[in-house]
Amino acid sequence: MNFHPFPIQTSKRLFLRNIKASDAETIFFLRSDKTVNQFIKRPKHRQTKSIEDAFSFIEKQHKNIENNVSIVWGITLKNDPQLIGTICLWNFSENRDVAEVGYDLNPEFHNKGIMSEALNMIIDFGFKELKLHKIEAFTDCKNESSKRLLTKNGFHLNASRKDTDNASNLIFEIDNNLI
C-alpha cells in the first residue's frame, strides 16, 4: 500500500485532494461544530478544540499518508477550491485488507448527494487500488443520515458485531465483489 503520489480523485462534481495548512479553519469547523459532530464521540487526544489543534491534525494526517498508515482527502467542488468536507480510509487491519471509512461534511452541503459521490470514489479506490476485501463504517445508532448514506451505497449492517469502544455505534460493511 502506497499513497505516493497522493491519489487525487475526481468525479463529475467533486475534487478530492490532500488537505493543507490553508484548510485549518475549515478543519477546525468540521471537527468542532456541534451539528457536524453531534454523533461523533472522539477520545480527548483526538478532539480539535483550537485552530492549533487543527494544524496539528493536518500535520498528523500528512505523516500518516507519508507512512502509509491512513489517508484523508479534502472534499471540494470542482469549480471551488474551498474545502467542504473530508473523507478518509483509516484503521487498517493488520494484514491491510480491511479499512474503516470516515467522513464529515459542512451542513450547508447536506442532502445534495455530495457525500454519496465522494463515498463511491473512495469505495472504488479502496477496492481497485488498495485491493481491500472489505470497508467498514462505524456510525451512531441515532445518525439516520449516515445510516441511509451507507445503505444507499451498498453497505449492510453487521448486527453481530459490536463496537467495544462505543456501545451506541453500529457497524456497517461493504465487501469487495471484485475479488
Image (tube, rainbow, N blue to C red):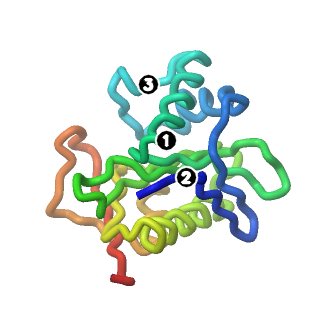
Considering depth in this image, is 74 or 143 the residue closer to the camera? 74
Q: Of callouts 3 and 1, which one flags the residue occurring earlier in the amino acid sequence?
A: 3
Q: Residue at x 74, y 70 (%)?
A: 12
Query: Pointer 1 and pointer 2: residues touching (CB < 8 Å)?
Result: yes
User: Residue at horizontal 54%, vertical 28%?
Assistant: 59
Look at the picture and state if 59 lies above or below 64: above
Nearer the observer: mark 3 or 1; the answer is 1
Mark 3: give few (<14), some (14-19) or many (20+) Cα within 10 Å. some
Residue 114, position as x, y percentages in the image:
65, 60
The quadrant in which the C terminus is found is bottom left
Quadrant housing residue 13:
bottom right
| Residue 66: image tag | 1
The kind of residue on which mark 2 rests is: His
Element carrying mark 1: helix
Left or right position of 175 against 65: left
Q: Are marks 3 and 1 in contact (CB under 8 Å)?
A: no
**CA separation, marks 3 and 1?**
22 Å
**Which SS class for mark 3?**
loop
For the residues bearing labels 3 and 2, Cβ distance under 8 angstroms = no
Please determine whether, in this image, residue 30 is positioned above or below residue 107.
above
Residue 171 occupies quadrant? bottom left
The residue that mark 2 highlights is 4
Left or right, 168 with respect to 56, comes to left
Decide which of 22, 164 is in the foreground and name it. Answer: 22
Residue designated by label 3: 47
In the rendering, at what x and y percent does residue 160 appear? 14, 63
Q: Position of residue 117 (x, y in %)?
A: 61, 66
